[in-house]
Image (tube, grey):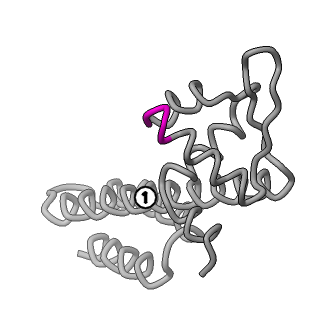
Amino acid sequence: MDETERLLLKEKPCQALLAILELDQAYASLISKRIDSTFAHTLRILSQLEQAGLVSTRTEGRVRYVELTGPGRRAAEAIRMLRDAIEDASDVKKRIRRIQELIDEAERAQGDRELLAGPLRRDLALLRSRSSKAEIDLLESRIRRIVSR
């Protein structure tokens, strides 16, 4: 593993790249605030990112602006996609846990269980492409058992 790969496996450098991507005109103190890091540490990160060819700097007056290079932009966009995928997976897990809780409640409920099962089936259908088939199949079989009682 080379130094650039090691650098991009750390939290603050990734946050710095994302901050630069999202800011119109990025400079060290603004990036430092955005990533909740000391100014000195941010300067060290930016220096490493510049040495890796992921950012470049330009000075206008007293301000030194930081910009993504082509590879830096691709890396930042890949990090953003990875972050979004992780957040999506977390959201799916939360939704599945909530459906499991509702199925548990429906198993204990009295009355029209079919009425309780309808929305759960719909929610599972929406999650089918975003979760494991086995997990969804198991929940669907639990719903079928509830309705068939």
Residue 41 placed where, x, y %?
48, 42
Residue 46 placed where, x, y %?
63, 45
Residue that badge 1 annotates = 90
Up-down relation of residue 23 to residue 16 (above or below): above
91 or 67, nearer to the observer = 67
Q: In this view, does 78 lie to the left or right of 95?
A: right
Residue ID at (19%, 55%): 111
Going by the numbered disc 1, the residue's amino acid type is Ser
Residue stretch in magenta: 37-41
135 or 25, nearer to the observer = 25
Residue 123 placed where, x, y %?
47, 58
Residue ID at (43%, 54%): 119
Write down the quadrant of residue 31 in the picture. top right
Write down the quadrant of residue 149 in the picture. bottom left
Residue 147 placed where, x, y %?
31, 70
Q: Residue furthest bottom?
A: 134
